[in-house]
Image (cartoon, coloured by chain):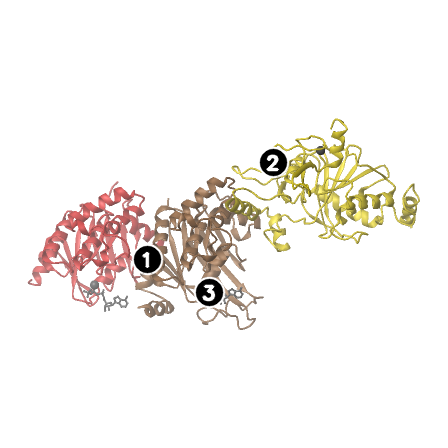
Amino acid sequence: MHVLGGKEIKGFEDVSFSVKRGEFLAIIGSSGSGKSSLLKCMYRTYLADSGSMLYRRDSDNTIDLTTASDHEILRLRRNEIGYVSQLLQAVPRTIALDVIAEPLLQRGIGIDDARDAASGYLSRLRILEDLWDAYPSTFSGGERQRVNIARALIRAPRLLLLDEPTSALDPASTAVVVEMLRAVNHGTTMIGIFHDLSVVRELADRVVVMKDNRMVGIGTPEEIVGDRGD
Amino acid sequence: MMLTELSNLAGTDSGALEGYNFAFLDEFTKREIRRKILKAVAIPGYQVPFGSREMPLAKGWGTGGLQITLSIIGKSDVLKVIDQGSDESVNAVNIRNLVSRMTGVGTTSDTGRATIIQTRHRIPEEPLTGDQIAVLQVPFPEPLRTIEPSEQVTRRMHAEHDYSGMWLHLYEDIVKHGKITIGARYPCLVNGRHLMDPSPIPRWDVPRLHKSPVIHLFCAGREKRIYAIPPHTAVEPLEFEDYRFETEDFGGKVCERCGSSDTFLDEIIDDATGNARYICSDTSFCEKRQRGEDV
Amino acid sequence: MNPAPALEVNNLTKIYGSGCRKCIENTGPDHSRNVCPVCGSVVACADITFDVMPGEILGIVGESGSGKSTIVRCLHFDMEPTGGAAYLRCSGNDSGNENIFLLNSQRKRAVRNLHLGMVYQNPQMGLRLDVTAGGNIAEKLLAAGWQNVEKIRDRGGKLLKRTEIPLERMDEAPRNFSGGMQQRVQIAKALANDPDVLLLDELTTGLDVSVQARILDLIKEIRRSTNAAMILITHDLGVIKLLSERTIVLKDGRIVEMGLTDQILEDPQHEYTQLLVNSVL
Ligand SMILES: Nc1ncnc2c1ncn2[C@@H]1O[C@H](COP(=O)(O)OP(=O)(O)OP(=O)(O)O)[C@@H](O)[C@H]1O
Ligand SMILES: Nc1ncnc2c1ncn2[C@@H]1O[C@H](COP(=O)(O)OP(=O)(O)OP(=O)(O)O)[C@@H](O)[C@H]1O
Ligand SMILES: [Mg+2]
Ligand SMILES: [Mg+2]
Ligand SMILES: [Zn+2]
């Protein structure tokens, strides 16, 4: 029996919600309200103090991300859960193409195939071909952020966590990224933090609102963003 | 009491010098050495420590070989002693005379007639038989000493069959010189287990230890070690698949005395002409060939 | 279903000195010391338990004297642990279910020659400086039974190429090599027999930055191209961040924290780890 994957997160200072498979959940809220912390807890970069986060795997077994072993989390990160950080972590001395190809190499895919796939993402994200074999540490913030996103998308994760993926981008690049995220396979569930409400309107199925480390609302973009009178 | 009787018996026997125990060593010492020989035979190639005695001979001149010979010799034995192939070198003559006077046994230079052959640096050319015993004088019993100064460590290496250091030594030799340059004292694996120093015999003699019908007894008097190759035991020089062990090549030279082309030759530089001459290192063998005997 | 760890270590303890019954309880991070006040023994490490997966790099960080080298040197049989067990579960190792610390010395040597590779903090410990670079690699191959000089040199040449040592220096002794080159020869030697577990002790310490960077890249390449489990010791958090996915934090011979490297760096739980992380930033 195949049940659609669904994810449930309970109790992060009263944060409780669940996300269905393929759903796009946006998180909004003022600076310092705990959005990034919440996302990092899901990725286990932060350890949750209490509560549970239940993630339903492909195989239909459910795993609590707060108590899973480090090895299990690493396996999930390698195969199922992607994360795009707010600040790009550039990989030193590695050209853009290989930064993106690396997750595939880790899975044992050959270098040529991996670079092929990586160049596909780079062109779709409108990174100039001249830059493909340059070091991302020399890139502009926007270019770096796009490399970052490509690196996460190339894994075809089942759950993608996005921490302000468009914050460093100009409107044109933002449009490219939004288009890209919309085009992501419907099997991928996304949880993303956004400041730009127009992006939220375009992408999100539902929106969570954070304030002072608490969740203060959840609803459709129309309900939430509409309520705030944007 | 018993012992005194024994020694009196031996001492008064034909030819042996009066006032000494038969074969010079006292019976306790002989028994100790025989026990150690038995142990050495039981563990081919393993160096057995023993209580080396003071001998009427300077250390380093064959005191080890002499102690073995004196411990195993009996009245019916016939002794041959050679030094680098020669029965007539001073050292060989002295040892032969000493044993003869202390036991009264007969001596010979004929390899075929001897029952015990004590030797330094050579194995006779004439094939030995299972009735004979070869006793080799050994200056340095430890084959690993060239690569490892510590006795404690070399013992561990033998115990664990850890000879990679010696292999590395051979590898480095090949890298530096294009071939293995070890001449005498070529390291050999005995019975697939213990690495052994065959004493400073030339490489020429090494293959003749392999599965030989003869028992070979080795003894280092100064270093107090006995080891043995029992009859029909595998003795394999260390070699690589692509850098094989090779015996000395005399480039087609023949012995100028007997005409042999299949013996280990000594090169002698003629003082007058400066020319090199070649003669058999095994003098008794050479003489036999000169007499036309079939050997 | 899930892959088994390549190496499992349980309660590894090493005490230098006679030791007494109070050694363990009187030392450790809570006492800020590793010397037993009763008997004066050094508790270099105690109750160390962890595992490493094939293909994983496990980082070990901690201040000088915290016991990092002691752990890997026990695992490499360079010294006898006082207590604890380790299991090496890799194909071709017939002692997979035996505590490797209890094997006889001949079998330990076989495990070391066939399944382990070590890069020492100090190249003098890992290399015979007067034996050629190629010979240093050959030693490992010879110990594993290789008997063909050409094949040995071929393998040695490939390893040196991979670690960026010019081939023409293969027959030179590493005594006169630079520190970075010596470290590369050590790595080549450690890789000689395609080890299942690689022990890397401070492999970039004391090298200048550009040399460090290239050695770290080399380790990444090794991670990509082999399935070796690696233990990477360093006191440089940058190295850990770059290379290891999981990290152990050691203090006064004890594990004070173990977790995903990003969690250790961004959300350290133990007071000492917090200090360590903050003193870098
Ligand atoms: N590693 C940390 N250690 C200590 N405090 C932290 C840590 N990470 C976050 N915080 C604190 O937790 C609170 C929430 O931070 P968080 O980064 O989650 O906010 P945010 O909602 O993502 O804000 P922004 O919109 O500015 O990115 C802040 O007060 C922050 O200072
Ligand atoms: N042979 C020895 N005898 C006594 N004490 C020792 C010995 N070797 C190490 N120690 C002690 O054991 C403790 C741990 O040493 P170890 O070398 O494992 O530390 P480390 O974490 O590797 O340090 P570093 O970062 O300086 O290399 C130290 O207190 C050290 O002084
Ligand atoms: Mg944030
Ligand atoms: Mg150390
Ligand atoms: Zn002749």
- Amino acid at pointer 2: Asp
Residue A22 can be seen in this image: no
Mark 1, chain letter? Answer: C
B55 sits to left or right of B144: right
Image quadrant in which the C terminus of chain B is located: top right
- Amino acid at pointer 1: Leu
Q: For chain A, what colour was chosen?
A: red
Q: CA distance from mark 3 to mark 1?
A: 25 Å
Disc 3 residue lies near ligand 2 with CB under 8 A: yes
The label number, if any, that marks residue C242 in the structure image:
1
Disc 2 residue crowd, few under 14, some 14–19, many 20+, Cα 10 Å:
few
Vertical relation: A120 (above or below) A230: above
- Amino acid at pointer 3: Gly
The chain coloured brown in the image: C
Q: C266 or A172, which lies in front?
A: A172
The chain coloured yellow in the image: B
For mark 2, give the secondary structure. loop
The spot of residue C256 in percent (x, y) is 41, 64
Q: A183 or A201, which lies in front?
A: A183
Q: Which residue is mark 2?
A: B249
Mark 3, chain letter? Answer: C
Disc 3 residue crowd, few under 14, some 14–19, many 20+, Cα 10 Å:
many
For mark 3, give the secondary structure. loop
Q: Could you tell me which residue is drawn at 71 percent across and 47 percent down? A: B138
> Residue B76: which quarter of the image?
top right
B151 sits to left or right of C110: right
The spot of residue A9 in percent (x, y) is 24, 56
Mark 2, chain letter? Answer: B
The label number, if any, that marks residue C253 in the structure image:
3
Front tag of 3 and 1? 1
